[in-house]
Image (cartoon, rainbow, N blue to C red):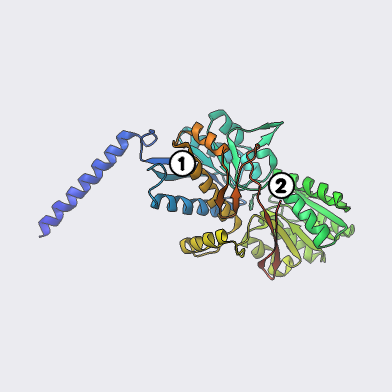
Amino acid sequence: MKKKWVSMASLLVGVTMLGSLVAGCGGATSSNSKEIKIGANFEMTGGIANFGNQTVNGIKLAFKEANANGGVLGKQLTLVVADNKSEPSEAANAITKLITQDKVKAVLGPVSSSNVLATTQIAQDNKVPVITATATNPKVTFDNGQVKSQIFRGCFIDPFQGTVMANFAAKSLKAKTAAIYVDNSSDYSKGLAQFFEESFVKNGGTIVAKEAFLQKDQDFKATLTKIKATNPEVIFIPAYYEEVGKIAKQARELGITQALLGTDGWDDPKLVEIAGAAALNNGFFSNHYSPQDTDPNVVKFVEAYKKEYGQEPSALAALGYDSALMLIDAIKRAGSDDPAKIRDALEQTKGLQVSTGIISLDANHNPIKSAVVIEMKDGKQVFKEKINP
Ligand code: PHE
């Protein structure tokens, strides 16, 4: 009996070794391999690591579901994750490694506009398609009067997001004056500051102060004091949770009681941890989706995500999931995992139902999608309104 087990075990080892030899022979990147390798260029560590990790979780869930259903074109999707450390130069290194060493067929990510912008020329030169789930700056897909042929996105863009918050300030909060506090190290923040200003002024409002800070700054009190002196009715802070958390805390310490307005970069539980729940009251931000939305596509995704990870998905997780669905849809329609064919199919994305809406890409590779406004109430996100473009 014992002997039988031993020989069974050695047989198994032999078979497994043979299996890996065969796989090795085929070459993991050959076109007839049983897998399709997709690169993930994400902020796994550094300033916006929570964003990167949540987006990757969303992508992994979509890949898992697709693979469980027999894969795509009969092949299994594998995700090769490269950490860009939340830095543009590292994002460029990460995409180079994914393309040249890992030989991926397409790249998902990064999250932030600045990090994606650091990779678009490399994708163009190597002719490998990129989908960013989350980067909202218009220049990501379109610059110098030209659409970037390899770059696609799954989210709305900042001229819309800036308008949503300017209209919210002018119409819902009836504000006539606003201050803008911009992160000068971020393309995302600088773009939004401009788009908000344009729309707010169009609504008859006045911008009474414009101040700037940089990522990793710790002390915001000097500039906040200048803003306070102009007595704006609202302060617009289009930035990421680390800095916004500190800004909100210090603003309230200085006795600034006005409404603080923000954008998708606010969407992380760490915002509340850093600022404290009370500092964020009278705080509102725009986002891509709310887990409290009763739309059946949202409900279905939220349930699947909670089952997988035991927590509520942020907008990043939802957008990550949706970007994977965009890619899967394109590979299926292409009938091939050849990067050039995936690119052509991506460009034709039409009427694709995803958790955060329906994706039809326009000529500039952007979908038209609705936004939500979220109110922060005692540390909780409360879904206020949905705004259609
Ligand atoms: N829109 C942000 C950017 O372009 C990234 C982001 C998306 C952050 C969604 C949070 C939620 O940099």
The residue indicated by pointer 2 is 158
The residue indicated by pointer 1 is 332
Name above or below for residue 167 compared with residue 280: above
The reply to whether the residue tagged 1 has its Cβ within 8 angstroms of ligand 1 is no
Residue displayed at 56% across by 55% down: 355
Residue displayed at 76% across by 66% down: 282
**2 or 1: mark nearer the eye:** 1
Residue displayed at 53% across by 37% down: 345
Q: Position of residue 171 (x, y in %)?
A: 82, 59
The three-letter amino acid code for the residue at tag 1 is: Lys
Nearer to us in this view, 43 or 329: 329
Query: Total number of numbered labels?
Result: 2
Q: In what element is the residue under mark 2?
A: helix
Dot 1, crowdedness within 10 Å: few (<14), some or many (≥20)?
some
**In the rendered image, is residue 35 in sight?**
yes
First of labels 2, 1 by sequence position: 2
Nearer to us in this view, 344 or 220: 344
The three-letter amino acid code for the residue at tag 2 is: Asp
Q: Measure the alpha-carbon separation of dots 2 and 1.
A: 30 Å
Q: Position of residue 250 (x, y in %)?
A: 76, 62
The reply to whether the residue tagged 2 has its Cβ within 8 angstroms of ligand 1 is yes
In the rendered image, the quadrant that contains the N terminus is bottom left
Please state if 346 lies on the left or on the right of 241 as rendered.
Answer: left
**In the rendered image, is residue 189 in sight?**
no
Residue displayed at 61% across by 65% down: 292
Dot 2, crowdedness within 10 Å: few (<14), some or many (≥20)?
many
Q: Position of residue 33 (x, y in %)?
A: 36, 37
Q: In what element is the residue under mark 1?
A: helix
Please state if 1 lies on the left or on the right of 281 as rendered.
Answer: left
Please state if 96 lies on the left or on the right of 204 as rendered.
Answer: left
